[in-house]
Image (tube, grey):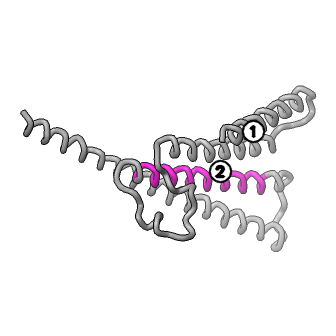
Amino acid sequence: MKITEHIFETFLWNARFLVILAVISSLVGTLLLFTLATMDMFALAKHFISITLLGEVKPDDFHVEVISHIITSVDDFLLAIVMLIFALGMYELFISKIDVAEDCDHSTNILMINTLDDLKDRLTKVILMILIVTFFKNVLYVKFDDPLNILYMGAGILMVSLSVYFTHKSH
C-alpha cells in the first residue's frame, strides 16, 4: 500500500508541470500583444505623418482617432503585462523560483511572486489600470449635449477614483 501511495503522490506532485502549458501560452499571448500594439503604433505614426507632413486630407475626427489608437495600444500593452505577470507568477508558484530574478540587482518586486495572493494583487492592479484606460477611451466618444451625459461621466470618474483609492487604501 505504501508503494502505491508513493507512486500516486509522485504522479500528483509532478502533475504541477502541466502549468508549463499555461506559462508558455501566456508568453505567446504576451508576445502577440506586444507585437500587435507596436505595429498599431507604427501604423498610426505612418498615418499621422502622411496627414501632417504629406498634406493628405485630414478627417474631421482626426484628433479623437489618434488618441483612440494610442489608448488602444496602451490597453494592449497593459494586457500583455497582465499575461507576463501571470506567466511569471504561475511558474514561480508551481514550478520553481526564478533564480535569475532573485540574483538580479535591478529586479523589481512586481515580478517576484511568493503567494497566490501576491499574484492576485498584482493582476488586480494591472486589470484596474486596463479598466481605467478603457473608460478613458470611451469618454472620447461621449457627446456632452445632454446634462444626463455629463452626470454619468462625473459618476464614472467618481467610481474610477474610488476604485483607485480603495485599492491603495488596502495596502
Q: Quick check: 150 above or below 93?
A: above
Label 1 residue SS = helix
Q: Quick check: 117 above or below 54?
A: above
Q: CA distance from mark 1 to mark 2?
A: 21 Å
User: In which quadrant of the rendered image does the N terminus lie?
Assistant: top left
Q: Which residues are magenta?
A: 65-91
Q: Quick check: 147 above or below 96?
A: above
Number of other residues with Cα within 10 Å of mark 2, as a class: few under 14, some 14 to 19, many 20 or more = many
User: Could you say where residue 58 lies in the image, as x and y percent from the top left?
Assistant: 84, 60
Tell us which disc is closer to us: 1 or 2: 1
Label 2 residue SS = helix
Q: As shown in the figure, which amino acid type bears the numbered disc 2?
A: Asp
Residue at 67 percent of width and 55 percent of height: 74
Residue at 66 percent of width and 37 percent of height: 170
Residue at 62 percent of width and 47 percent of height: 126
Judged from this view, the residue extending furthest toward the bottom is 53
Number of other residues with Cα within 10 Å of mark 1, as a class: few under 14, some 14 to 19, many 20 or more = few
Residue at 16 percent of width and 38 percent of height: 8
User: Could you say where residue 120 lies in the image, as x and y percent from the top left?
Assistant: 53, 41
Q: Give left or right: position of 28 versus 1.
A: right
Q: As shown in the figure, which amino acid type bears the numbered disc 1?
A: Tyr
Q: Is residue 162 found inside the magenta-colored segment of the image?
A: no
User: In which quadrant of the rendered image does the C terminus lie?
Assistant: top right
User: Could you say where residue 15 lies in the image, as x and y percent from the top left?
Assistant: 26, 44
Residue 165 disc label: 1
Front residue of this view, candidates 162 and 144: 162
Marks 1,2: beta carbons within 8 A: no
Q: Main secondary structure of the magenta part?
A: helix
Find disc 2 in the rendering and name its residue.
Answer: 75
Front residue of this view, candidates 117 and 134: 117
